[in-house]
Amino acid sequence: MGIVRTRFAPSPTGPLHLGNARTALFNYLFARRNNGSFILRIEDTDRARSTDEFERAIYDDLMWLGLVWDEGPDIGGAFGPYRQSERLKLYAEEAERLISEGKAYRCYCTRERLEELKAAQAAAGKPSRYDNRCRDLKPVDAPPGVPGVIRFKVPVKEVLFMDGVHGLLSFDSRTLGDFVIMGSDGIAAYNFAVVLDDARMAVSHVIRGDDHISNTPRQVLLFEALGLKTPLFNHVPLVMGPDKTPLSKRHGEFSLKGLRDEGYLPEAIVNAVARLGWNPGEGIMGLDELSDAFSIDKLSKSASGFDEGRLKSYNKDAIQIKSSKELSILMGLNTEAAGLIDALKGNASTLRELETLLRPFITGPSPGSTESDELNQEHAKKVIKAFRLALDAIPGLKEESYKDLVEGVKAATGEKGRRLLMPLRLALTGMHEGVELANVLKLIGREEAIKRLRRFEN
C-alpha cells in the first residue's frame, strides 16, 4: 500500500457538524490503522465567510474528540503551509504554467454574458457549461485592464477512476466544459487548490462525502495535466438529517459545540458517527479499537440517517463507564458529589440531565411558579404535613420505611396516586420528574427530608 497519508480539510466558515466529524474520524482511523499520518488542512480561501474563531473551534472540536493530527496549521510539518490562504503564490504559479503549456487560458466573459448563456442552455434543455468562447483568444485581443479568470482546457476523453467505496467510475469530459481554476481576484478555485494541496502534501488516500464525486473527474484531469500523482479516492455516502436532507451547517443543533453544550461525551459521538455507514461491532469502543477494525472495504454504499436516540444510548453508556470522580470534574463539581453521582448517573442520558438530577440534592428544592402553585393547594399541604409527622415518628430510615410511610400517609389523608406522591416529590426536590422517591429519601436522609417538608407544610 505504501505510505498512507490522509487529510481532513474543513472550511472555517461555521461549526463542525456530525457529518464533518465522521469524515475526520474515518481519515484518522485509516491513517492509524496503517501507521500513517493524519493531516489537518484549513481551506480558508472563502474570505467573506472564513474566520479565526471558526478555525480555533475546529481545533477545539477535533481535540475534544481525540482526533489528534500529525501535521497542521498550528503545529506545522514538512509539507506546509497548511492554510490555503498561505498557498496563493503556489496556485498562481501553477496556473500560469498551465497557460504556458497550452492547457489553460484567460477568459474575459462578463458575469452577465455567462448568465445569459446559462439561461439559453436551460431553455434549450441543455446542461449548463461554458461554450469555450475565449479558448482561442489571442493576447492582443484581450480587453485592456480586465484581469479575467483562468479556465482549464478540458480534453475530450473518458475520465476513469477507481473509487474505494463505489468501484470503477466513468465520466465523459465533454459534460464538464472548460472550468475556472483561478478567479479574477487571484483566488484559486476549489478543484484547483485541492489538487495542488493533495499532491504537494503527498496525500495517498482521499476519504470524503460522495457529494464530491462530481468534482473528482475535474480533479483527475488536473492531476494528469499537472503531471502529479493521483490519490486513491473513497467517497462515503452522506449522513442525512432528520429532515431527510444531507446533514450540514444549517443543522445547527447537531454541531459538535451544540452537542457538547447539551452534555454529550466525545466517546458517545465517536461511537455514534463511526456507525454511520460502517459497523465495527457492538458497544462503546475506544479509538484504538476502532482503528484496528477500520477498513474502507467495509463502508456502506448507502446513505446513513442520523439517529439522535442512538446517540443518546451511546452517551448513557459512556456516562456509566466513567467514574463519579471523572464526571464530577467534567461538570465542575466538588468531588464530594461523587456519591450522589454514582447513585443518579444511571438515570441520565446526558451530563445536562445528570446536572438537573443532582441540583435538588446539592442546592435543595427550588420550585418554579407552577410547582409553587401545586404546593400551595390544600391537599398538597395536608399530604406534606402527614408525611413529615410520619418521619418524625420513626428513629431512622430503613429499606422498608418508604413503603410503610406512604401507606400510612395514604390512610391518614385519603389521597392516592399523583395527588399523594407529587406533593412529596415537589417538596423534596422542587421538580416534577427525577429519580424514585424512595431513592430521594435515601440520598437526602431523614433529617434533611423533615427540614424540606416543614418548609412547605404551612
Image (cartoon, grey):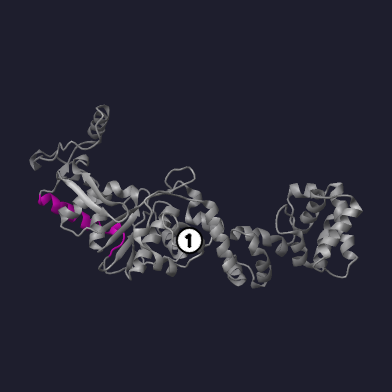
Element under label 1?
Answer: helix
Look at the magenta stretch and give its main secondary structure.
Answer: helix
Q: Position of residue 120 (x, y in %)?
A: 24, 28
> Residue at coordinates 59% horizontally, 59% vertically from top-left?
350
> Which residue was labeled with disc 1?
271
Amino acid type assigned to the residue bearing label 1 in the image? Asn
Question: Residue drawn at (28%, 59%), measured in percent from left and top?
Answer: 86
User: Is 82 inside the magenta-drawn segment?
Assistant: yes
Image position of 403 (left or right of 157): right
**Quarter-of-image position of residue 227:** bottom left
Q: Is residue 284 above or below residue 158?
A: below
Asked if 352 appears above or below 238 in the picture, the reply is below
Q: Residue at x 57, y 69 (%)?
A: 322
Query: Residue 92's image quarter?
Result: bottom left
Of 452 and 424, nearer the camera is 424
**In the image, residue 454 above or below residue 152:** below
363 to 339, vertically: above or below: above
Give left or right: position of 175 versus 48.
Answer: left
